Amino acid sequence: MGGGRKVKSVMLATIIVPIFNIEHYIKQCIDSLLPLLKHKCEIIMVAGNSSDCTNDVALQYAAQYADVQFIYQNGKGLSNARNCGLRVAKAEFTIFVDGDDFVDAAVLSRLLDSITSNTDVLMTNFYRNYENNGSEILISEINNNASNGLENLQYIINPHKCFWNVWRNIYRTDFLQKHDLLFLENTYAEDIDYFSRVCIEKPVMQYSKEAFYHYRMDRKGSLMNDVPLVRLEQTVHVIEESVQRLRNCKEPWTEAVISGFQFEYLLNMVFVCNYSKQQRKQAIKSFTTFHQVLCPACDCLVRWLTRIVSILGIRGVSRVLSMIRCLKRKIEHRKAT
């Protein structure tokens, strides 16, 4: 068939779920999504070469439900898995769900129904779920007074928190396809890169205070618990590229996003003191251009920390941040119990 008009998809949302070595979590994840099948949604599980029973469990779901697909990724890594899902997505909207997390289907259904006809990206609040004690805290950056529009992003995000996670958003599939918005592969910090590239395409933004996503913290075996040197080097590089990309954009809303990326850049210095002597030298080299990344800065805390880096050096700041991080985690866990 050629030359015909593109038929509008009858599916409302494609939910892309990368799955890899999560046999203890995949059932909770997929079970939380199944009610959405009645809401004209499809689930695409994108599998890697798991060494546990993850793929066996996933295949059982695919065999039982017509709108649950199982496909193998054609490469490695989270970004590749998401891209494989994007290439076969056929619904009006696209949602990314990590296989070790879960959702509130009822809330997600309401959000899908609430999206206006011209919205490209809907941003929501979310929950942090602490596996060690089963508690949760709501990460609330969006309130009833939030005004829609990309220009208001600067009033929504907190530059001292991770606002760039792709799983907190609902994307219009046509928007992603029009701008060829695939994930940067073979690197860490892919969400930072993706968020910046989505934003510079000037999507029509909608905000909701509702939270459908439950992000699992402190999972044993999670990539987030292991910070090899290559991950630090790639994260620093991605932040550098993203900051420059946004500076070139020269829009008022970019200042808040840049401030958030600069703060994350500084926070990554905490890992330097955890490496061996030889690796520590390499880690410090990753921050050679910190003045170009951090200056100029609109955020007072970023400016203050940049001065501290100039005085104490990367290694000294790493030790200070490490102590602050331990204290912060203790406070967070205390609040969550």
Image (tube, rainbow, N blue to C red):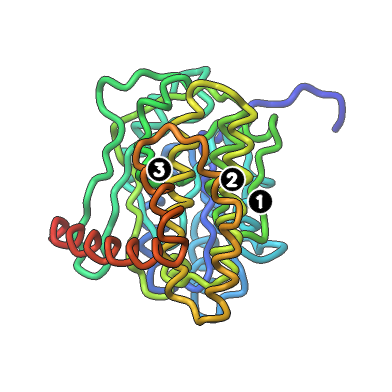
Left or right position of 171 against 320: right
Mark 3 vs mark 1: give the one in front. 3
Marks 2 and 1, the one that precedes in the sequence: 1
Between marks 3 and 1, how big is the CA–CA gap?
27 Å
Left or right position of 305 against 223: left
Marks 3 and 1, the one that precedes in the sequence: 1
The foreground one among 265 and 220 is 265
Q: Percent x, y for residue 312? A: 41, 60
Amino acid type at circle 1 is: Leu
Amino acid type at circle 3 is: Val
Q: Quick check: 239 above or below 208?
A: below
Amino acid type at circle 2 is: Asp
Q: Are marks 2 and 1 in contact (CB under 8 Å)?
A: yes
Q: Are marks 3 and 1 in contact (CB under 8 Å)?
A: no
Identified at 24% across, 45% down, the residue is 138
Determine which of the numbered discs, if any, sits on residue 193 in the image.
2
Q: Quarter of the image holding residue 182?
A: top right
Determine which of the numbered discs, if any, sits on residue 8 in the image.
none
Q: Percent x, y for residue 147? A: 35, 18
State the residue position of label 3. Answer: 302
Image quadrant in which the N terminus is located: top right
Q: Quarter of the image holding residue 114?
A: top left
Q: Quick check: 33 above or below 271?
A: above
Marks 3 and 2, the one that precedes in the sequence: 2
State the residue position of label 1. Answer: 184
The foreground one among 60 and 139 is 139
Q: Percent x, y for residue 84? A: 66, 53
Image quadrant in which the C terminus is located: bottom left
Between marks 3 and 2, how big is the CA–CA gap?
20 Å
**Secondary structure of the residue carrying numbered label 2:** helix
